[in-house]
Amino acid sequence: QVQLVESGGGLVQAGGSLRLSCAASGRIFTINNMGWYRQAPGKQRELVAAITSGGSTNYADSVKGRFTISRDNTKTAVNLQMNSLKAEDTAVYYCKADGLSTWGARFDSWGQGTQVTVSS
């Protein structure tokens, strides 16, 4: 199995910054895509940002220019630098990764989520 552990959430004032991190562990052969999703109360989970193994990125329009996604050299961890935070960024943020396990099975794993609260 593949596990994802997130860290870095918390409470911040509007205009401030937070950095989320997510580390993958387990029977990993390769990770293709990693990303961050968020879910606010009463809303559907939505993509925030994603990054491929080759480094291509994709951002939600609402966070372009404010958030930056990156992967570490091992390709098993992903970070989300969030700047100029707004109250509407308040949500539970989830890390997601997909790839192949060491026994050849595809995996599609989610982290447990980390709360980000932006006070206005």
Image (tube, rainbow, N blue to C red):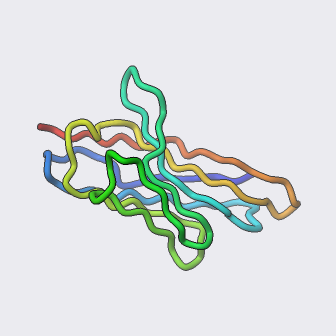
Q: Who's the residue at 60% across and 67% down the image? A: 76
Q: Nearer the viewer, residue 61 or 75?
A: 61
Horizontal side, residue 55 vs residue 80: left or right: right
Q: Nearer the viewer, residue 28 or 61?
A: 61
Residue at the outermost front position: 61
Horizontal side, residue 11 vs residue 29: left or right: left
- Asked if 107 appears above or below 25 in the picture, the reply is above
State the image coordinates of residue 95 (x, y, percent, origin top left). Answer: 52, 49
Q: Who's the residue at 16% across and 54% down the image? A: 16
Quarter-of-image position of residue 42: top left
Residue at the outermost bottom position: 73
Horizontal side, residue 49 vs residue 28: left or right: left
- Asked if 72 appears above or below 35 in the picture, the reply is below
Quarter-of-image position of residue 7: bottom left
Quadrant where the C terminus lies?
top left
The image shows a total of numbered marks equal to: 0
Q: Who's the residue at 64% across and 52% down the image? A: 3
- Asked if 52 appears above or below 86 in the picture, the reply is below
Q: Who's the residue at 51% across and 56% down the image? A: 50
Residue at the outermost right position: 103
Q: Nearer the viewer, residue 63 or 29?
A: 63
State the image coordinates of residue 11 (x, y, percent, origin top left). Answer: 22, 44
State the image coordinates of residue 23 (x, y, percent, origin top left). Answer: 54, 61
Quarter-of-image position of residue 90: top left
